[in-house]
Image: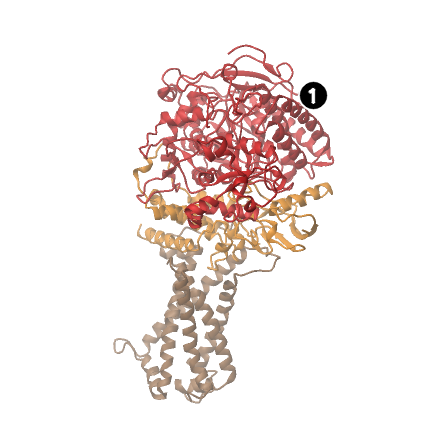
Amino acid sequence: MKLKLKIWRQKNAVDAGGMVSYDLEGVSTDMSFLEMLDTLNEKLIMEGEDPVAFDHDCREGICGSCGVVINGDAHGPEQTTTCQLHMRSFKDGEEIIIEPWRAAPFPVIKDLVVDRGAFDRIIGAGGYITAPTGSSPEGNSTRIPKPDADAAFANATCIGCGACVAACPNGSASLFVSAKVTHLNLLPQGQPERTTRVLDMVEQMDAEGFGGCTNTGMCTVSCPKEIPFTSIANLNKEYRRAVQQSNKA
Amino acid sequence: MVETLSKNPRVTGFGTLHRSTIGRKMIMAVSGLAMLGFVVVHMVGNLKIFFGETEFNEYAHWLRTIGEPALHHEWFLWIMRVGLIVALVAHFWAAITLSRHDVKARPVKYQAKRKGGYATTLMRWGGVTLALFIVYHILDMTTGTVNPATTNEPYDRITSGFGEWYNVVFYTLAMGALCAHIWHGLWSAANTLGWNRATTAGFRTFAVVFALAVAFGFLLIPYSVVFGLVD
Amino acid sequence: MTDQTMVGEGEFYSVGGPLADDKAPDGEIQTRWERRKFASKLVNPANRRKHKVIVVGTGLAGGAAGASLAEQGYHVVQFCFQDSPRRAHSIAAQGGINAAKNYRNDGDSIYRLFYDTVKGGDFRGRESNIYRLAENSVKIIDQCVAQGVPFAREYSGLLDTRSFGGVQVQRTFYARGQTGQQLLIGAYQALSKQIDAGNVEMHARHEMLDLIIVDGRARGIVARNLVTGELSTHLGDAVVLATGGYGNVFYLSTNAKGSNTSAIWRAHRRGAYFGNPCYTQIHPTCIPRSGDHQSKLTLMSESLRNDGRIWVPKKHGDNRPAAQIPEDERDYYLERIYPAFGNLVPRDIASRAAKNVCDEGRGVGPGGQGVYLDFADAIKRMGEPAVREKYGNLFDMYARITSENPYKQPMRIYPAVHYTMGGLWVDYDLQTTIPGLFAAGEANFSDHGANRLGASALMQGLSDGYFILPTVLNNYIGSQKFAPVAADAPEVTEVETLVKERIDKLLSINGDRTVDSFHRELGQIMWDYCGMARNDAGLRKAISEIRQLREEFWKRVRVPGTGAELNQSLEKANRVADFIELGELMCIDALMREESCGGHFREESQTADGEAERQDDKFSFVAAWEYAGEGRFGGTQEPVLHKEDLIFDYVHPAQRTYA
């Protein structure tokens, strides 16, 4: 395959950056998208150019490191992570536009690499269940109905890649926050911190500068782990409940 | 580290809901639903026009007498109006502040062609259209300032107003915007208020049917005038 | 142990004095950890915040340790090279985590888990450590449930368990195929809370490049900020390395692309002994490589072997599509050779058998590097929906990567490097031979002997992180006095200078080969000669080729850009330089160990029917390698082998058979 790549190049956080075109030949349809970028980089290095920086690690769709916007779609045309996207999803001779996640709270560090530290700070604000090591009761002492356990799991599969933010027209982190709130607030262990968790996480989400949710559903469509849109309704419900609780207090 | 927007004081109850994005969305949802309630009653009331001029005008006058004698003449209407203005202002304030916040969250746009997410744009521009329409509509039908009718009777205003082609066109456009606004806004409000069945296919279909019904109900009147069913 | 000369001794290495763990108490194994804990020194809670503990790595071991130490009140300074502590490669573990809960009432016990692990490790692990691991397994589940890890549950609301490779009880707890992810997120959330509270100073996108030793004790590290390139020195009272395994020495492995040996290799070069470097686990069911562009290999869960049948054509070079090969021309070789266990033989056996049939020229797919894993019978027996229900996500993943439909044609699989049992040598307190330097999780050598059982890696990482490190660090810190280390102390500045020089050197070569090309070449050498089967001649060849490669690397590598920016080529170059040195040591270790055990198969040491043969009289020891400086051959100078004799008081070594 022969491709025409248009890639966002930006030397560092303060550089203005811009799109640069590259022609790449000899791309196999069996390559993953990142292997295609590897091939380009090997070529660039030998030509004395700076290779394209991009985040990646496990390359099996679970660590959440990778993620670029491909032809306007977060993670590209398939609903999976960028590392699990293969070149057979593209046509020979196609022009591919590759851009970093775009959101104020995700500033570009270099080329396609962005800083997603905001997600860590949101989790730190309340996305946990306090259970200091050594303090835990016997695992089976609290039963959890299977539907609750399954729903908690479905939300806990979020890999924190940030595609939801990248895909949202408002750069909103609602899906990410809702997945964690839903996961933890569904579990009996999560009850004592149920109220403060959602208030603290939303407060941090706002402070980071993520946009608000306008219910476009673009996040769910691009989520490689298929976090359901109803999680956002659940976030809102938990929020409403928490505000009501703090009203009483 | 990203330069964060200044941290608002914490939300401590419904009184401080406006401090967070979700809180503002809830304000937008509640005010939107209140206005939607009015719109539905307004639309149903309008349909009385098909029972003839007398009955319609009587209905319009009766609206001013609701609550009497406990309330003074037209007080009920004024209470409603104040309520609507409050809802409208809250709705607008939430929309504007949230939109500005949202735009700030994506300072650099994508170069690739955008795919989807048009609902937001539609809501924002549709909202502006509706605002302009409301102003015109009040000048047209409530105060009669721009209405060609020679009397102050509601029936006369309607038939005269919709006798002008531009009114029909503008009214149709506005009802299109209203339809789109309800279409997305109804289930969106339900979602924002945390009703977890808001996004089910069933409820979304209901929202579509509901939005179309409201718009259709309103449009029956101008087109009845145009086609001479009401004159 | 007899004192005869070992193969390669004097030529590639020398033999030093014996080594022993002096921390585990003697006597009854059931109470050793209890007694060790009671004998440990404590640190007054009010004093803990005065002590800084450096933790490198945020996987299960590092994340759990960082959170637990901070909860105790220590000031933790933690590092990870990824952009967030949530991304460490523990996240990719699929299957589950073992725990001797005996919820099934099927006869499980701590002792049985201990027994299975010693045996599964082919009697090359340390009994005291393994018993403690089994003991802690029970508490791990409680801890994780309390944190909100959504383990699979039954309709009763109780925790579900399933069976896993090579054991007869159902003791594996799981969260669908994402157990590692869920456990890691649990630890990450606990860590995040401590970061938010200011008890953990987290440095993401930082890579440790060297270790600082003052007065013989580990007192700090030098790290590079991967965004700005800035080198920074971090001093503290103890250093914990929880930096994972080194499977990426093979270039192609199931490890994450960033997984590397640099932290433990740098520590090794500063005096920490390296235990059993040649013990590598090769997982039988991975998706074969599709071409030279391949950058990593993807594991398909072992559970597939429950219902899939493995075969190759009987005829050499049979290129017909699978469907056109009639039943009587297929060789279901595992069922043929191991009728008792069939397709469910342990990982090392299954991997070697696949290699053998491919070496015979009967492999399938591109390059003949694959065997079929066929679900046709299972689909006929259970129906496609049932197969989909059980394995759907794996089939989808396979289809996405290969664009073949595994419901219609058999999967192609091939073994791939998956886990390294070797690592820094540690005593019972997880302390390396450098006082104050601790190693946890896959980074140490301790608990899995020569072969790790499925669902045991997660258990070990969390046992080390949540339960062992907090205790042993209390003891270490409580029994020492710490004078502050000056930032300009010669021990500090010397290391800083060396790190800087090395980076400058890498950037200045400006040769004609990319870092990846060296990494691929190293991987090929390692795979060919130090992979699934090893022999004397091959290992000698590998050592000489690696030495050449190392020389060439330092002459011809091209690292573009500067050191003062995000420079992924430079990061890779640093790691590959260390992998080359480690690769040599792995080959030397493999050459020395003239027996077959677990993942280490020496062709010279096999039974008449081709099975691995252990030689307990000669090799019942842990090989702990001491670094001896730069060598004459451009490699490291002949390392020194120290033997830790393995003593089996409880589980007595026996040869494994599966036929």
Determine whether, in the image, residue A160 is placed left or right of residue A40: left
Q: Report if residue B28 is visible in the image.
A: no
x, y percentage for residue B137? 45, 78
Say what secondary structure mark 1 lies in.
loop
For the question of whether residue C392 can be seen, the reply is yes
Nearer to us in this view, C461 or B15: C461
Chain seen in brown? B
**Residue B197's spot in the image, x, y percent?**
38, 59
- Pointer 1: residues within 10 angstroms few (<14), some, or many (20+)? few
Above or below residue C454? Residue B55 is: below
Instruction: Locate residue C425 relative to residue A51 in the image: left or right.
Output: left
Q: Where is residue A19 in the image (x, y as percent from the top left)?
A: 66, 53
Q: What's the residue at 46%, 24% (across, down)?
A: C656
Q: Colour of chain A?
A: orange
Q: Where is residue A201 in the image (x, y as percent from the top left)?
A: 43, 48
- Residue at numbered disc 1: C633
Q: How many labels does the image show?
A: 1
Residue furthest front in the image:
C328
Residue closest to the far top:
C3
> Quarter-wise, where is residue B60 in the image?
bottom left
Q: Nearer the viewer, residue C213 or C340?
A: C340
Q: Which of C384 and C485 is in front in this view?
A: C384
Mark 1, chain letter? C
Q: Is residue A86 depicted above or below C422 in this figure?
A: below
Picture quarter containing residue C119? top left
Q: In which image quadrant can residue C263 be found?
A: top right
What is the image's colouring?
Answer: by chain
Q: What residue type is labelled 1?
A: Phe
Q: Colour of chain C?
A: red
The reply, left or right, for residue B37 in relation to residue C603 is left
